[in-house]
């Protein structure tokens, strides 16, 4: 085959057209190689990052020698000893509205609570007259009173048996220093219309800046009654027949004496039908209260036995709303467990 001779014209075309194309091709080849290298570098970097992340994740899931596992946070368990507002409530008992807490530094400014006023209770005749007695402490007998006392804080009218409340209850004695810190002698009586209590409290530092459902953050008196002792003798949770009432002397100034019902939850309220009065003494105060049986929804019968505890909350920090200790006539007493209470017997009517 005869080769075609390239003349000057052809060589001129190759020089002006083909050679620039060859140069351009080489340039793009170089750029393509550079782009390829950069992409490979990026992919390699991503692979290293992914490897590091997977490694960190695997190490986090393992328990390395000397490495302590993180401690999970748990909310503190409230003390269920002293007050009904912290106690467990059975699911069949409606809860009262939750109130805003009282400021711990309160000086007694009234709290605008939304708790209903006293609700009437249907009358029944629970309790037991078969001699059922709880094994906690000694039974307390409420004397039948033919001449009821005047509710004025003067205990000189009381001639019935005097009982003592001077035993600390579980988890509530760390701050108690003895009978002069807080203790009480109390009397209890009844007639067909009312249950009566008279309490002579010894307290080396009287403090009460709280009221209503928060009166336990001061020096109050508390009464617990299981009105169906035989029916739920072994039941360790409060029910609709278990009552907790509070009595405050006020502060002998801006706060007046008052009564409050914590339990049953569905009936939580101020007790305006309960008469309370108190007199401050050199070493504490004397308090009297008259409680209509209608507040408890029962018709009293002599010889009836009820679950019972009379207790005193104590606060020794002037000007501060807080709770520090509690004593009772029953050392086993717990708010939410009626099996830890004692026994009240309605004495014979004359």
Image (cartoon, rainbow, N blue to C red):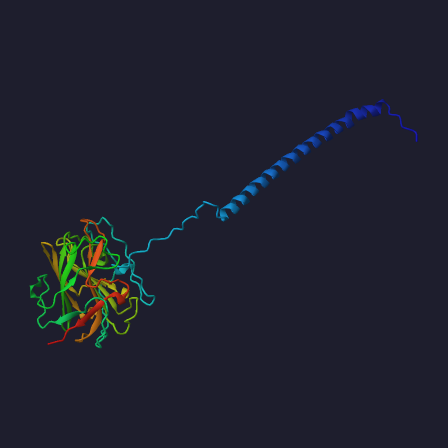
- In the picture, which quadrant includes the C terminus? bottom left
| Extreme-right residue of the structure | 1
Query: Does residue 262 appear left or right of residue 7 in this picture?
Result: left
| Extreme-left residue of the structure | 156
Quadrant of the image occupied by residue 313: bottom left
Quadrant of the image occupied by residue 173: bottom left
Residue 59 visible from this viewpoint: yes
Give the x, y percent position of residue 323.
23, 54
- In the picture, which quadrant includes the N terminus? top right
Residue 124 visible from this viewpoint: no
What's the residue at 72%, 29% (across, down)? 26
Give the x, y percent position of residue 309.
21, 65
Depth order, front residue of 47/298? 47
What's the residue at 26%, 61% (across, down)? 84
Depth order, front residue of 20/241? 241
**What count of labels does the image hold?**
0
Query: Does residue 45 appear left or right of residue 272 in this picture?
Result: right
| Extreme-front residue of the structure | 65
In the displayed structure, would residue 110 be above or below residue 152? above
């Amino acid at each position: 085959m005869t080769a075609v001779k390239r003349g000057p014209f052809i060589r001129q075309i190759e020089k002006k057209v083909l050679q620039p194309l060859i140069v351009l091709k080489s340039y793009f080849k170089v750029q393509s190689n550079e782009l390829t290298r950069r992409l490979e570098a990026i992919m390699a970097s991503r692979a290293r990052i992914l490897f590091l992340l997977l490694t960190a994740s695997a190490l986090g899931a393992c328990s390395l020698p000397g490495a302590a596992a993180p401690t999970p946070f748990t909310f503190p368990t409230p003390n269920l000893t002293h007050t009904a507002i912290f106690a467990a409530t059975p699911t069949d008992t409606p809860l009262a509205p939750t109130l805003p807490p009282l400021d711990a530094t309160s000086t007694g400014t009234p709290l605008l609570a939304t708790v209903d006023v006293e609700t009437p209770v249907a009358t029944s005749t629970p309790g037991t007259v078969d001699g059922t007695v709880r094994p906690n402490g000694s039974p307390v007998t409420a004397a039948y009173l033919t001449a009821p006392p005047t509710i004025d804080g003067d205990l000189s009218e009381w001639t019935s048996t005097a009982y003592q409340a001077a035993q600390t209850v579980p988890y509530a004695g760390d701050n108690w220093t003895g009978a002069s810190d807080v203790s009480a002698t109390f009397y209890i009586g009844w007639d067909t219309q009312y249950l009566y209590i008279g309490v002579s409290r010894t307290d080396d530092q009287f403090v009460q800046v709280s009221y209503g459902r928060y009166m336990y953050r001061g020096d109050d008196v508390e009464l617990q009654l299981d009105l169906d002792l035989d029916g739920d003798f072994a039941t360790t949770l409060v029910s609709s027949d278990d009552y907790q009432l509070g009595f405050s002397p006020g502060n002998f100034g801006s706060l007046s004496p008052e009564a409050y019902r914590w339990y049953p939850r569905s009936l939580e309220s101020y007790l305006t039908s309960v008469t309370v009065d108190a007199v401050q003494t050199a070493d504490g105060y004397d308090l009297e209260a008259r409680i209509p049986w209608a507040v408890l929804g029962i018709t009293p019968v002599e010889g009836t036995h009820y679950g019972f505890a009379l207790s005193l909350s104590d606060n020794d920090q002037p000007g501060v709303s807080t709770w520090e200790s509690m004593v009772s006539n029953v050392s086993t007493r717990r708010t939410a467990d009626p099996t830890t209470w004692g026994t009240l017997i309605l004495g014979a009517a004359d």
